[in-house]
C-alpha cells in the first residue's frame, strides 16, 4: 500500500485539488483515483508530478509494507469466521487481561460467551465480569478497526468507555466512564499522578511517543509502563494499557503480546521496577509475544509478515 500524505500536503499548500492536478498534467482520472486508493503510480507519472511540484519522489509518498496479521484479523472479523486467529486472540487476550484484573470467569466461560453469547452461570459469576468480557471483545474489534490511526487521547478515552460503560462502576457519581479520574488512586501501594495533572501527563506522553520516527517493540512497552504509572482512569487502566499496546503493535507491524494470567506476578514486578530495571517488563512482554508467535505459526502467519 502507498501512503500519499506527502503529495496531499504539497497539493494543499499550493491550493490544488487532485482532480485539478490531473487536468494540469494531462493525467487520466483513473490514474488520479489511484492516489486515493493508495495504489502505485507509474514512474512516468511520478516524474511528471515531481517536475510540476519541484520535489523529489520520496517527498510524495511512502510505501507501507503489507500487514498480514492485521489484514487477516479484519477479514475474519468482517466475515464472522470462527476457529481462526481472530477467534483465538479474542478469547485468549480477553480471558488473560480480565483475569489479571480479578475476573472470576474461567477461560472456558470466556470462550462460551464469545462463541455462543451464553454462559453457564452456576458459579456465582458477577454480571460485571460478563459485561466486561463482552466489552473487551468489542474493544479488541475497535483496536483492529482503527489500528493504523495515530494514537490520540480520544482513542484512549474511547477504549475506557467501551470497557466500562453499563457496569456497576459507571453508576457511581464520581466514576468518569470514558474520561480521566476525578479522585486520586494508588497502584502497588504507590500514589499515581493526581487527577488535576492527568491530562497534562497523558499529552506529554503522547507527544514524546509520536515524535519517535520508527516505533519499536521496546518503545511500545515504554509507553505502556509510563501509561500505567500515570494510571489516568478510576479503574480499567491495565486493560486499556494492554489494548493500546495491541493496537500499536498492529499499527507498526510488530507481533502483539498476551500477558498470561500465570505470569502476572512477573508483569507487575516489571511495571513496579521499570524506572530502575527495564529488562523485567521487556522480558515478560517478549514471553507474551512468544505466545502470539505460536498462534501465528499455527495459522501460517509467520514472522515474515510481522517483525
Image: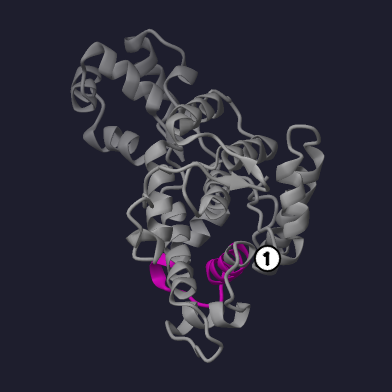
- On the image, the x and y values in percent for residue 114 come to 48, 77
Q: Quadrant of residue 276?
A: top right
Residue sitting at x 35%, y 17%: 48
Query: In this picture, which residue range is highlighted in magenta?
Result: 77-97
Q: Residues within 10 Å of mark 1 (few under 14, many from 20)?
A: some
Position of the C terminus, as image quadrant, is top right
**Placement of 208 over or under 115, stated as above or below:** above
Residue sitting at x 62%, y 67%: 99
- On the image, the x and y values in percent for residue 280 come to 80, 44
Residues 85 and 66: in front is 85
Q: Secondary structure at mark 1?
A: helix
Residue sitting at x 18%, y 22%: 20
Residues 276 and 208: in front is 276
Query: Is 270 positioned to the left or the right of 176 in the image?
Result: right
Characterize the magenta stretch by its predominant secondary structure: helix
- Residue 88 included in the magenta stretch of the image: yes
- On the image, the x and y values in percent for residue 125 come to 52, 81
Q: Quadrant of residue 192?
A: top right
Q: Which residue is mark 1?
A: 295
Residues 60 and 297: in front is 297
**Placement of 264 over or under 20, stated as above or below:** below
Amino acid at each position: 500500500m502507498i501512503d500519499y500524505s506527502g503529495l496531499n500536503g504539497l497539493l494543499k499548500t499550493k491550493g490544488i485539488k487532485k482532480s485539478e492536478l490531473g487536468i494540469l498534467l494531462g493525467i487520466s482520472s483513473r490514474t488520479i483515483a489511484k492516489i486515493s486508493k493508495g495504489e502505485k503510480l507509474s514512474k512516468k507519472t511520478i516524474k511528471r508530478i515531481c517536475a510540476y511540484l519541484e520535489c523529489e519522489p520520496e517527498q510524495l509518498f511512502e510505501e507501507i509494507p503489507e500487514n498480514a496479521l492485521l489484514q487477516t484479523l479484519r477479514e475474519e472479523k468482517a466475515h464472522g469466521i470462527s476457529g481462526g486467529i481472530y477467534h483465538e486472540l479474542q478469547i485468549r487476550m480477553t480471558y488473560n487481561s480480565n483475569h489479571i484484573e480479578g475476573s472470576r470467569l474461567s477461560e472456558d466461560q470466556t470462550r462460551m460467551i464469545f462463541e455462543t453469547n451464553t454462559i453457564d452461570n452456576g458459579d456465582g459469576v458477577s454480571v460485571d465480569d460478563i459485561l466486561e468480557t463482552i466489552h473487551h471483545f468489542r474493544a479488541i474489534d475497535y483496536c483492529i478497526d482503527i489500528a493504523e490511526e495515530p494514537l490520540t487521547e480520544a482513542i484512549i478515552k474511547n477504549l475506557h468507555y467501551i470497557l466500562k460503560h453499563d457496569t456497576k462502576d459507571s453508576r457511581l457519581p464520581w466514576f468518569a466512564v470514558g474520561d480521566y479520574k476525578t479522585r486520586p488512586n494508588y497502584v502497588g501501594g504507590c500514589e499515581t499522578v493526581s487527577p488535576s495533572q492527568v491530562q497534562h501527563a497523558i499529552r506529554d506522553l503522547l507527544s514524546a511517543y509520536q515524535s519517535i520516527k520508527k516505533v519499536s517493540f521496546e518503545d511500545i512497552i515504554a509507553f505502556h509502563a509510563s501509561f500505567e504509572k500515570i494510571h489516568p482512569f478510576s479503574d480499567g487502566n491495565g486493560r486499556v494499557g494492554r489494548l493500546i499496546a495491541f493496537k500499536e503493535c498492529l499499527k507498526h507491524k510488530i507481533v502483539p503480546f498476551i500477558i498470561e494470567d500465570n505470569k502476572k506476578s512477573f508483569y507487575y514486578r516489571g511495571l513496579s521496577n521499570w524506572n530502575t530495571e527495564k529488562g523485567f517488563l521487556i522480558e515478560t512482554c517478549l514471553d507474551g509475544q512468544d505466545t502470539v508467535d505460536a498462534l501465528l505459526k499455527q495459522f501460517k502467519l509467520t514472522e515474515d509478515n510481522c517483525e
